[in-house]
């Protein structure tokens, strides 16, 4: 017996039990409404999606071709449309997630207006967006299942038993649009207690995976900008534990923590780590400090700081800001230490912020990490901050030159030029871009690929094209040809925008509640029937 049939029976028993008070209740209608609202709380969603993500991680460990993907979101509608599109084109949502980008919240969702990615936006906007995303995904479930129920009623009315059974099978095997969200908590928005409190709100909203970075909260910068400042490992591990305690308190025992290191591009630290013995974690952190070894107090000026590192007295270089510098070219070693330390102290996945998409660079770091933690896995930012075309054309140029191929026809500094688009070099570069995710998952331990800001850029591009046509000579044809005609021919659900906003579901409910007296919007005069 299907879940729907069980619910019909259960409500039928209630109607008998309560007698006249339930006389106007149709058990099948009540069961349908339950089916259209499978998840009642954010914690149910967090547990459901944590189980999915854990299974996906195990699948990846068994086969690196089973990597997962997501796209960044800044509005519930955007996330909903992604999942509707995924189901439409691929028939399943498996291995596809959503990413909640702190950058996009700052740029698009703050009450202060557009802000840089520096944790200046309201922290409450993070769990609010998680809740919004899942509200829209649950509405996508209700809309699609409502359509199936209407088809079921039509098949019954026509006496078409075969069609009725086929539709019933679709209802019984319905796949939800609700998928895992990897949610960005930045650097925790304060101390470890602040991190714990915000993590709780995020989990209660439905987040099963929380990504946290090792930057200083009040000095936080976008991962692809300069001026990043990291914290000693003890500070970062306290926040990782705070997130884990939040998961455990709320009963999501298998929640996922993604530990991000910005050390590759961060040359500064705000504080010198506490160390109690040579070779401990604090001592290792301090060993990367740039400075001068001194022999006596005569080498110390007013205000200088001295620390014992590597068995010697080190006077770290300090900037006018009070920040301390790391040694040049120490980033890779710091990344490896960060990652090993995070995995050995509670993190489940890694995020290494890099300055370019290069499989070899990532693999070199991951191979070192895996010497200590063999099953280390990454979440990787396929960032729009990279110039993918230029990066990969330069990689191919360098590979060709190293192999002895004549590259005199190319200007390495100008490889972005359209004049190279049809060349052998450009075609090979595009092929490497196409296979980057599969290659990096196979060779560099990347379990999850995401693009942080895709719809920020697609919205800007499509709006620019529409404005140019609509306000130009094309006029209304700019919209019809560039948007609506494509929506119709590509079967984009939003062409029936009233349906997407819940009009048909509202009609269903009116019929449930009022019977023949229901005043419905979907009659013959509804212009949506033109589609």
Image (cartoon, rainbow, N blue to C red):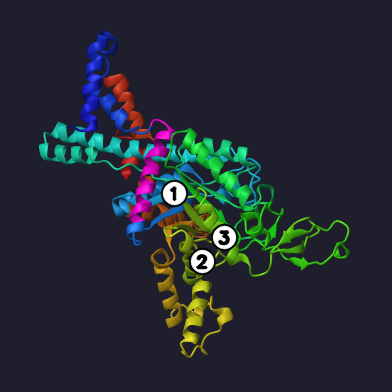
- At mark 1, the secondary structure is strand
Q: State how many labels appear.
A: 3
Give me the residue at 61% from left, 41% from top.
192
Of tags 2 and 1, the one toward the viewer is 2
- The percent coordinates of residue 287 (x first, y second) are 67, 62
Q: Earlier in the sequence, mark 2 or mark 3?
A: 3
325 falls in the magenta region = no
43 falls in the magenta region = yes
Q: Which residue is mark 3?
A: 337
Q: Earlier in the sequence, mark 3 or mark 1?
A: 1
Q: State which quarter of the image contains the N terminus.
A: top left
Q: Is residue 470 visible?
A: no
Give me the residue at 45% from left, 53% from top.
71
Q: Which residue is mark 1?
A: 98
Between 516 and 141, the one lying in front of the other is: 141
Q: Is residue 12 left or right of residue 105?
A: left
Question: Contact (CB < 8 A) between labels 2 and 3?
Answer: no
Magenta span covers which residues?
Answer: 40-60
Between 415 and 158, the one lying in front of the other is: 415
Q: Is residue 415 left or right of residue 526?
A: right
- Residue 142 falls in which quadrant of the image? top left
- At mark 3, the secondary structure is helix
* 355, above or below 45, in the image: below
Q: For residue 365, which numbered disc appears in the image?
A: 2
Tell me if mark 2 has few (under 14), some (14-19) or many (20+) residues whose alpha carbon lies within 10 angstroms of its own.
Answer: some
């Amino acid at each position: 017996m299907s879940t729907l049939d069980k619910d019909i029976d259960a409500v039928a028993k209630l109607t008998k039990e309560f007698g006249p008070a339930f006389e106007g209740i149709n058990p099948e209608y009540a069961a349908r409404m339950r089916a259209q609202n499978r998840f009642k709380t954010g914690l149910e969603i967090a547990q459901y999606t944590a189980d999915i993500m854990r299974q996906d991680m195990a699948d990846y460990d068994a086969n690196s071709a089973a990597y997962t993907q997501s796209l960044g979101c800044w509005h519930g509608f955007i996330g909903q449309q992604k999942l509707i599109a995924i189901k439409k084109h691929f028939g399943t949502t498996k291995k596809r997630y959503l990413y909640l980008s702190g950058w996009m919240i700052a740029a698009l969702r703050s009450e202060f207006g557009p802000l840089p990615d520096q944790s200046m936006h309201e922290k409450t906007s993070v769990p609010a967006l998680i809740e919004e995303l899942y509200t829209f995904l649950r509405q996508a479930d209700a809309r699609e299942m409502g359509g199936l129920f209407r088809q079921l009623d039509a098949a019954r009315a026509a006496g078409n038993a075969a069609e009725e059974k086929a539709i019933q099978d679709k209802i019984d095997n319905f796949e939800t649009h609700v998928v895992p969200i990897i949610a960005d908590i930045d650097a925790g928005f304060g101390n470890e207690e602040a991190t714990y409190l915000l993590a709780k709100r995020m989990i209660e909203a439905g987040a099963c995976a929380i990504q946290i970075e090792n930057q200083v909260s009040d000095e936080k910068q976008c991962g692809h900008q300069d001026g990043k400042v990291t914290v000693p490992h003890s500070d970062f591990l306290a926040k990782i534990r705070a997130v884990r305690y939040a998961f455990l308190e709320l009963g999501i025992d298998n929640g996922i923590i993604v530990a991000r290191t910005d050390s590759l591009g961060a040359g500064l630290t705000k504080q010198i780590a506490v160390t109690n013995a040579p070779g401990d974690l604090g001592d290792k952190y301090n060993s990367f400090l740039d400075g001068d070894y001194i022999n006596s107090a005569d080498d110390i000026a007013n205000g200088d700081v001295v620390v014992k590192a590597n068995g010697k007295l080190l006077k770290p270089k300090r900037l006018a800001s009070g920040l301390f510098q790391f040694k040049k070219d120490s980033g890779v070693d710091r990344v490896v230490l960060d990652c090993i330390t995070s995995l050995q102290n509670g993190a489940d996945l890694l995020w290494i912020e890099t300055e370019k998409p290069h499989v070899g660079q990532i693999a070199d770091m991951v191979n070192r990490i895996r010497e200590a933690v063999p099953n280390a896995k990454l979440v990787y930012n396929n960032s729009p901050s990279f110039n993918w075309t230029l990066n990969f054309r330069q990689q191919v140029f360098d590979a060709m030159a190293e192999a002895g191929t004549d590259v005199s026809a190319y200007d390495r500094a100008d490889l972005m030029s359209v004049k190279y688009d049809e060349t052998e070099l450009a075609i090979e570069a595009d092929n490497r871009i196409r296979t980057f995710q599969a290659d990096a998952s196979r060779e560099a331990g990347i379990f999850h690929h995401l693009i942080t800001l895709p719809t920020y850029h697609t919205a800007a591009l499509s709006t620019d094209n529409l404005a140019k046509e609509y306000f130009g000579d094309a006029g209304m044809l700019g919209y019809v040809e560039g948007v609506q005609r494509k929506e119709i021919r590509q079967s984009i659900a939003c062409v029936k925008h009233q349906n997407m906003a819940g009009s048909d579901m509202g009609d269903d409910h009116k019929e449930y509640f009022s019977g023949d007296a229901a005043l419905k919007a979907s009659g013959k005069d509804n212009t949506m029937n033109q589609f």
